[in-house]
Image (cartoon, grey):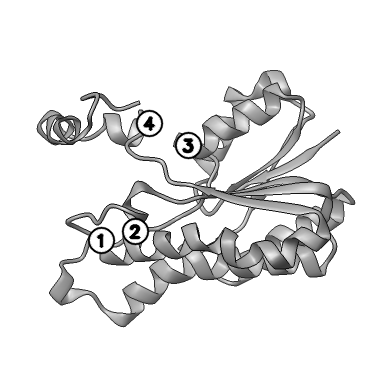
Amino acid sequence: MNYAVVTGSTSGIGLAIVEALLNDNCYVFLNYSTNKKRADEVRMLLAKHNGRFDFIRADLSDYSGIENLTATIRDHGVLIKYLVLNFGMTDRTAFGDITSENWERVMRANITIPFFMIQRLCNDELFSNNASILCISSLMASVPHAISPSYGISKSALSALPGNLAKYLSPKDIRINAVEPGFVDTQWQKDKPSTQISRIQAKITMSRIR
């Protein structure tokens, strides 16, 4: 059986990836930070896959989350075939009011911790043969947005991560790639005011959120 880790996986894109991996007969470690109620809801949602998934509570905006996650994998005695780095944070503070603390929080969550998580899993030899890492970046990595410069810049760095790590990971038989999703039809998008959704759709060539 192939084992997968999906960070930030109790909603939206992360949860959709989890469901796809489960349907492909993988064993999946889901990750959440503090919302146990939501984790319990997802556990019920995935009930038909019982026995092939587990939850790792790890705050991946903090370095301690790396240890929590890797310790759980070691305790299970398995090797990871698929690592999906989906967790991320943003900061919508006005440009003139952004603090160094808020800036570093977003950078830490979106690029620094993913880097050191990959390093730790490699150093601890927790990847299987022919493993694959997927970084979930964002369209804002390539198309500047009117808000949250720290988010766009950190996602630009995440998009650059595969090219910079490939030469280190390929000798270990590990592939690494990034994707830059645009507006995706998740609950987070659906909860936006209709006027905001209309503005978003007007920017999209096909005029719809996929």
Report, in whole angstroms, how far the alpha carbon at label 1 lies from the one at label 4: 20 Å
Residue furthest top in the image: 48
Q: Earlier in the sequence, mark 3 or mark 2?
A: 3
Are the residues at dot 4 and dot 3 in contact (C-beta closer than 8 Å)? Answer: yes
Q: Is residue 10 above or below residue 44?
A: below
Are the residues at dot 1 and dot 2 in contact (C-beta closer than 8 Å)? Answer: yes
Identify the residue at image location x=77%, y=25%: 25
Q: Which mark is residue 148?
A: 1
Q: Is residue 11 visible?
A: no
* Callout 3 secondary element: helix
Identify the residue at image location x=59%, y=67%: 164
Report, in whole angstroms, how far the alpha carbon at label 4 lies from the one at label 3: 7 Å
Q: Give the x, y percent position of residue 27.
A: 77, 35
> At label 4, which amino acid type do we have?
Thr
Report, in whole angstroms, how far the alpha carbon at label 1 lies from the one at label 3: 20 Å
> At label 3, which amino acid type do we have?
Ile
Q: Give the x, y percent position of residue 15.
A: 54, 34
Residue furthest bottom in the image: 100
The residue indicated by pointer 3 is 13
Mark 3, residues whose alpha carbon is within 10 Å: few (<14), some, or many (≥20)? some
Q: Earlier in the sequence, mark 2 or mark 4?
A: 2
Are the residues at dot 2 and dot 4 in contact (C-beta closer than 8 Å)? Answer: no
The residue indicated by pointer 4 is 186
Q: Earlier in the sequence, mark 1 or mark 2?
A: 2
The residue indicated by pointer 2 is 90
Side (left or right) of 111 relative to 7: left
> At label 1, which amino acid type do we have?
Ser
Are the residues at dot 1 and dot 4 in contact (C-beta closer than 8 Å)? Answer: no
